[in-house]
Amino acid sequence: MDLEPELLLQEARENVEAAQSYRRELGHRLKGLQEARRQIKESASQTRDVLKQHFNDLKGTLGKLLDERLVTLLQEVDAIEQETIKPLDDCQKLIEHGVNTAEDLVQEGEIAILGGVGEQNEKLWNFTKKASHIQLDSLPEVPLLVDVPCLSAQLDDSILNIVKDHIFKHGTVASRPPVQIEELVEKPGGIIVRWCKVDDDFTAQDYRLQFRKCTSSHFEDVYVGSETEFIVLHIDPNVDYQFRVCARGDGRQEWSPWSVPQTGHSTLVPHEWTAGFEGYSLSSRRNIALRNDAESSGVLYSSAPTYFCGQTLTFRVETVGQPDRRDSLGVCAEKQNGYDSLQRDQAVCISTNGAVFVNGKEMTNQLPAVTSGSTVTFDIEAVTLGSTNNNEGGNFKLRVTISSNNREVVFDWLLDQSCGSLYFGCSFFYPWKVLVF
């Protein structure tokens, strides 16, 4: 087919680009194939090692248990033998003593008889007197064989069949774990891990989540429960972590095989409270604040404006104290000292009684009162930038969603100027403890 040179060149370029794209895609698929092959090989090798180690340990344990049982039975044989032999030994000593006495008496009597009567009367008399003092008709009782123990070992050979049945049923090899991690979501100072069942025939009762730094060889438990997601806190930013999960079937004691480990990290700076503020004690990572007994009051702010629109800011109440109408949890455009609450201009907050305040004004809508274990979340999105034609003042509008105890309120928050990031804060007048992430 005849084509113009320019069209022919264009078509050739497109074909080259298509071939390059095809090659790249094949490369990605080849890489995926290699990873799949490596996973099969490595998991098979690990499974072999686990099986060998387990059965070697099992053999050692069973051998030890059998040896201990053998020692116990042998000690029982020794005890019975010693206990029943002792009376026989005592009887034997008595008989041997009687035999010696009788032999001596026979020899002495034979000598006395050989001397005849006359000068030997005294010997005969002494012998007769001596013989009368020995009870020659008194014999010790010797037990019959039926009256003494006859030891034997009672061994039930059926235990071999029982053990054999258990051994033949012991252990299984699973080609796929029944649960897998489906999503890792980064949070400031944490990572949300979500997982799901991949085996429809498996009924899960509990899940177990573990994590570790990629530089560590040891996984540690971080969650056990029935939920299918969990936020792992105390995550250092820009550090890779591995996560894995397993499940326990309904009514079972053993855990399923582990899921394929997933690697994730958080690039978000952890939220921290301002250190050294009188009236509040902080945890080592400065993400937990506890109102102490100091008489001073005021708002405890974040150390920096680390909350950005589009994120979810979460407060979790760890300990509750006596509520006060001035209590507050929320965000603000800037730090303002001299206030004892976030119920002020350029701030939005929720009080511990559930009242919501926007720029110092209480909203009609209200959330449930905050209790121990309550989670309060703030989701904020920018709605407009620049000037707005309204009579409410402010030229920067944010849409705020506050959620608590399965309820939420949504409203627009007007600020005097654009804010790329926001501070968070809290104020309490009695001992409350709150975690932020």
Image (tube, rainbow, N blue to C red):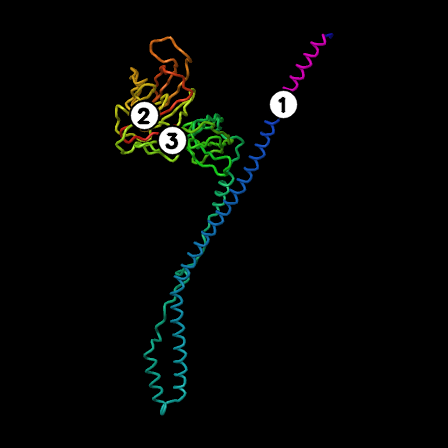
> From which residue to which does the magenta span run?
4-23
Up-down relation of residue 255 to residue 354 (above or below): below
Up-down relation of residue 347 to residue 44 (above or below): above
- Spatial CA distance of label 1 from label 3 is 46 Å
Up-down relation of residue 150 to residue 50 (above or below): below
In front: mark 1 or mark 3?
A: 3
**What is the quadrant of the C terminus in the image?**
top left
**What is the quadrant of the N terminus in the image?**
top right
- Sequence-first tag of 1 and 3: 1
Front residue (pair 160, 106): 160
Callout 3: SS: loop
Residue at which label 2 appears: 337
The percent coordinates of residue 163 (x first, y second) are 49, 43
Graded by Cα atoms within 10 Å as few (under 14), some (14 to 19) or many (20 or more), the crowding at tag 3 reads many
Callout 2: SS: loop
Whether residue 86 appears in this view of the structure is yes
Q: Amino acid at mark 3?
A: Asn
Q: Amino acid at mark 2?
A: Asn
In front: mark 2 or mark 3?
A: 2
Please identify the quarter of the rendering in which residue 397 is found: top left
Callout 1: SS: helix
The percent coordinates of residue 87 (x first, y second) are 38, 65
- Spatial CA distance of label 2 from label 1 is 61 Å
Label drawn at residue 26: 1
Q: Do the residues bearing badges 2 and 1 touch, measured as CB atoms within 8 Å?
A: no
Whether residue 203 appears in this view of the structure is no
Q: Do the residues bearing badges 1 and 3 touch, measured as CB atoms within 8 Å?
A: no
- Sequence-first tag of 2 and 1: 1
Front residue (pair 159, 284): 284
The percent coordinates of residue 77 (x first, y second) are 43, 57
Residue at which label 3 appears: 287
